[in-house]
């Protein structure tokens, strides 16, 4: 087409762009607001498949499960082995799964207070980066639990996490503490650490188990969306919908109210694989009924 034909190529492109922009604006004005997708995962140790590369194939049999939380320093091979990391990554891609988080980061018999804790943390962060995981669970229970009334107890743990925070930030990884502390003390700890990559991996059931039952659900609001990086869901060996320690509909409603938009990871107990598949199907349906993720622009 020549310029003299009365409608130049430049004019045609400009007109086409205006039409496309207008159509996009119309869609934006008429389309319903989109919600962040509900992300549900399962934990490798509770699937009884630590160190098993077939875990994603099995997870594919559980409708609604989008990710698997792997154990970093447990099983053989573990995630200190880069060949194993590559294999897990390949299998996750093959079966269409994400690996949202890594747990079990301490060597057998070790805790956050052990001499090798910094090394274990750094290796978990490295594996998380390679696997595209956004959270590393940093557990500290019972004797390892920090006492927020005693600086000699909590100080070294705060310093340890602060010491690897820059590495975690560079890797795009959040360090999620899960301890025996109350929600109030979790908040004190995170605020004292003072880093956007040090948050709380919230386990509502464990809050009750470690003596904070009355604060377990209110603690969700106390910590809020900005301090909670991920959530474990369990009702021991019962379905989530069944009566138990936690009023899960009330807990999920509170997560909805604070605008939580992260992963819910099952840490449920199972007696065998078939029972796991059946129970997880029911548990997923229960979460889909009660969990409402926030709007994408909120």
Image (cartoon, rainbow, N blue to C red):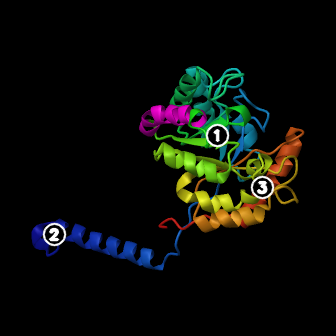
Disc nearest the viewer among 2 and 3: 3
Q: Secondary structure at mark 2?
A: loop
Q: Quadrant of the N terminus?
A: bottom left
Vertical placement of 194 versus 77: above or below? below
Which residue sits at x=46%, y=46%?
194
Disc nearest the viewer among 3 and 1: 1
Q: How many marks?
A: 3
**Res 130 visible:** no
Measured in 3D between alpha carbons, the distance from the residue under mark 3 to the one under mark 1, in whole angstroms, is: 19 Å
According to the picture, the residue beneath numbered tag 2 turns out to be 8
Disc nearest the viewer among 1 and 2: 1
Identify the main secondary structure in magenta. Answer: helix
Q: Is residue 58 magenta?
A: no
Measured in 3D between alpha carbons, the distance from the residue under mark 1 to the one under mark 2, in whole angstroms, is: 75 Å
Q: Earlier in the sequence, mark 3 or mark 1?
A: 1
Residue 103 numbered mark, or none:
none
Along the line of sight, which residue is nearer the eye, 169 or 178?
Answer: 178
Vertical placement of 108 versus 291: above or below? above
Q: Quadrant of residue 96?
A: top right
Q: Horizontal placement of 160 versus 153: left or right?
A: left
Q: Which residues are magenta?
A: 153-170
Mark 2–mark 3 contact, CB under 8 Å? no
According to the picture, the residue beneath numbered tag 3 turns out to be 213
Q: Is residue 167 magenta?
A: yes
């Amino acid at each position: 087409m020549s310029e003299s034909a009365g409608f130049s190529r430049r004019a045609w492109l400009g007109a086409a762009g205006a039409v496309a922009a207008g159509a996009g604006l119309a869609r934006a004005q008429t389309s319903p607001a989109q919600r962040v997708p509900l992300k549900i995962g399962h934990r490798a140790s509770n699937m009884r498949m630590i160190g098993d590369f077939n875990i994603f194939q099995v997870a594919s049999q559980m409708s609604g499960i989008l990710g698997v939380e792997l154990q970093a320093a447990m099983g053989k091979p573990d995630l200190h082995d880069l060949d194993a990391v590559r294999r897990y990554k390949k299998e996750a891609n093959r079966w269409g799964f994400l690996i949202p988080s890594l747990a079990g980061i301490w060597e057998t018999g070790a805790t956050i207070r052990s001499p090798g804790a910094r090394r274990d943390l750094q290796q978990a962060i490295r594996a998380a980066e390679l696997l595209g995981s956004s959270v590393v669970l940093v557990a500290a229970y019972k004797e390892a639990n920090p006492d927020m009334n005693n600086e000699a107890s909590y100080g070294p743990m705060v310093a340890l996490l602060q010491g690897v925070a820059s590495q975690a930030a560079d890797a795009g990884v959040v360090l999620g503490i899960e301890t025996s502390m109350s929600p109030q003390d979790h908040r004190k700890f995170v605020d004292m650490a003072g880093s956007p990559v040090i948050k709380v991996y919230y386990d509502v059931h464990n809050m009750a188990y470690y003596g904070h039952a009355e604060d377990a659900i209110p603690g969700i609001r106390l910590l809020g969306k900005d301090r909670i990086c991920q959530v474990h869901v369990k009702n021991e060996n019962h379905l989530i919908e069944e009566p138990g320690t936690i009023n899960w509909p009330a807990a999920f409603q509170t997560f909805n109210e604070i605008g939580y938009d992260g992963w819910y990871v099952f840490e449920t107990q199972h007696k065998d694989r078939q029972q796991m598949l059946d129970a997880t199907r029911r548990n997923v349906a229960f979460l889909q009924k009660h969990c409402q993720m926030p709007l994408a622009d909120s």
